[in-house]
Image (spheres, rainbow, N blue to C red):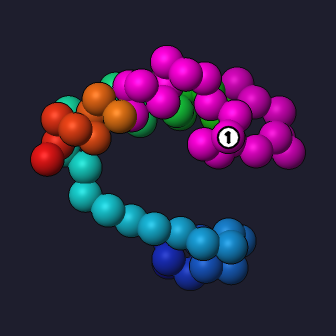
Amino acid sequence: ELKDFLSQNFYQTTFSFASRNCNNLAHVLAHKGCSMNLYDELNADNVTADVKALGASESASST
């Protein structure tokens, strides 16, 4: 049911496993997304440097 919804409402979706070490980044991104206007877009081009650094750090620690 979720896959059907996503495929009908989003251009592209990707699911991948992330260890608990990546929860900080997920929390920061969810918080940022919840504070945005309905039609704003959240992508790699408009996140702050500290969020990008956290993502890089967590990505390196998960390998």
Q: Which residue is mark 1?
A: 45
Q: Residue at x 27, y 33 (%)?
A: 58
For badge 1, the amino acid type reads: Asp
Q: Residue at x 67, y 40 (%)?
A: 45
Q: Which SS class for mark 1? A: loop
Q: Residue at x 39, y 34 (%)?
A: 55
Task: Give x and y (percent) for residue 7.
Answer: 61, 79
Task: Give x and y (percent) for residue 23.
Answer: 30, 33
Q: Which residue occupies the foreground of this view, 20 or 48?
A: 48
- Queried whether the magenta region covers residue 51, the answer comes back as yes
- Queried whether the magenta region covers residue 8, the answer comes back as no
- The reply, left or right, for residue 28 in relation to residue 47 is left
Q: Which residue occupies the foreground of this view, 34 or 53?
A: 53
Range drawn in magenta: 35-55
Occupied quadrant, residue 5: bottom right
- The reply, left or right, for residue 15 in relation to residue 48 is left
Q: Residue at x 32, y 62 (%)?
A: 16
Q: Is residue 60 visible?
A: yes
Q: Is residue 29 above or below residue 12?
A: above
